[in-house]
Image: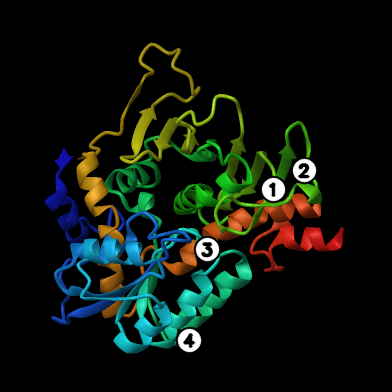
Amino acid sequence: MRINRREFVASAAALPVGVALPGMAFAASNNKKYRACIIGDSNCGAFGHALHRVWAVRDDVEVVAVADPDEAGRRQHAAEAKAKRTYADYAEMLEKEKPDLVTIAPRTTVNHLKYMLAATAVGAHGMMEKPIATDLAEADAMVRAADAKNLKWAIAHNFRTTPVVQHAKRMILEEGNIGEVLELRSRGKEDSRAGGEDLIVLGTHSFDLMIALAGKPLWCCSDIRTGDRPAGPADVRSATEELGPVVGDRIQATFGFPNGVYGYFSTVRTADGNGGRWGVDVYGTKGIVTIRLTEVPQIHLLRESSWTTGGKDARWAPMPGEPTMDRESLRAERYAPIVNDLIAAIEEDRRPWVSLQDGRDAYEMIQAVFASYVEGRRVELPLQERAHPLKRWNATE
């Protein structure tokens, strides 16, 4: 089954709850016209993965303004978003425009908290680029700010919401195509950012998907190395983008999930670089499902309890009944399920399907990896200490 661009947008309303895109509606039920503002910074994280265009899938949302301190970037992104006005200062924009919706677009996290607090101060709902924050204390402050005014905020974990991934989730958890789930295995992209930065930037998607498949983890145990030696406080560095401190170029982490399911995450810098392994593999008593987080997620099924292809009929195949998506459709409408559900969540007064809290949960797994290594023990989740483990580590040396 192939899904084109128009059908992908419509799928937000057509697919049933628990199968793909739950609780969504394409048009506002109360005929409200929402006013949206977009916060970007071409000098610091820009506009993320085209988050200035997310509202284009809605005919009931009008982009009234874009903020960017960089003049050329401001002009370009405002034109692409079809914004009516532009501002150099995001705070001035929010104060003057009083939007219903705000996009926090920069992919760097250093300013996410102040953007979020400014947006909630004017009573705006909205959507934020991932990862959520620079530490858990910031993420907690964001959630508190939204909850205090009953504001609905989503995060750009778009891979989980694609029809192909949702179909795979249903086949694994509801149809039992691979039997009882035993473990999850994930790797980062393992490109030039392999190690600590890969853990933050790509791990947030991997962990969001692992939680969707197995629930929130109960504990984490990790090992971090720089080259062939254990990482130390002197190895802590700033990420190449403003994402907070990172450490290590070889990371191995184990998570304990409910029902005895184990999860593993690795990111290792090698001379071969990115090998296309980024994603999550789900191992069950009757087979394996592999999910590769490419632009159009690639999903394959092996029905074989031994987890090998040595059997007579054992072979890798697409998931049965899997919807087929083309790259153009997914690129154009990659955030449509999240945006459509966010509007529905506002009108139904409920938490969005891909919520700010979900962004915090995935980020907590990232912080748990650092915390376990720094503390030299298995750590329980949720973490009691909300400050960044690597900042505490440096301070104690």
Residue wearing tag 1 = 247
Write down the residue under mark 3.
109
Q: Quadrant of residue 71?
A: bottom left
Q: Residue furthest front?
A: 71
Query: Callout 3: helix, strand or loop?
Result: loop
Q: Is residue 269 positioned above or below 31 on the image? A: above
Dot 1 and dot 2 residues touching (CB under 8 Å) = yes
Q: CA distance from mark 2 to mark 4?
A: 40 Å
Q: Residues within 10 Å of mark 2 (few under 14, many from 20)?
A: many
- The amino acid sitting under disc 1 is Val
Q: Secondary structure at mark 1?
A: loop
Q: Which residue: 59% across, 55% down?
A: 365
Position of 147 with respect to 32 (left or right) is: right
Q: Indicate which disc, 3 or 4, sits on the residue closer to the N terminus.
A: 3
Q: Secondary structure at mark 2?
A: loop
Amino acid tagged 3 = Thr
Write down the residue under mark 4: 148
Give how far across and how far down residue 189 sits, in percent.
50, 38
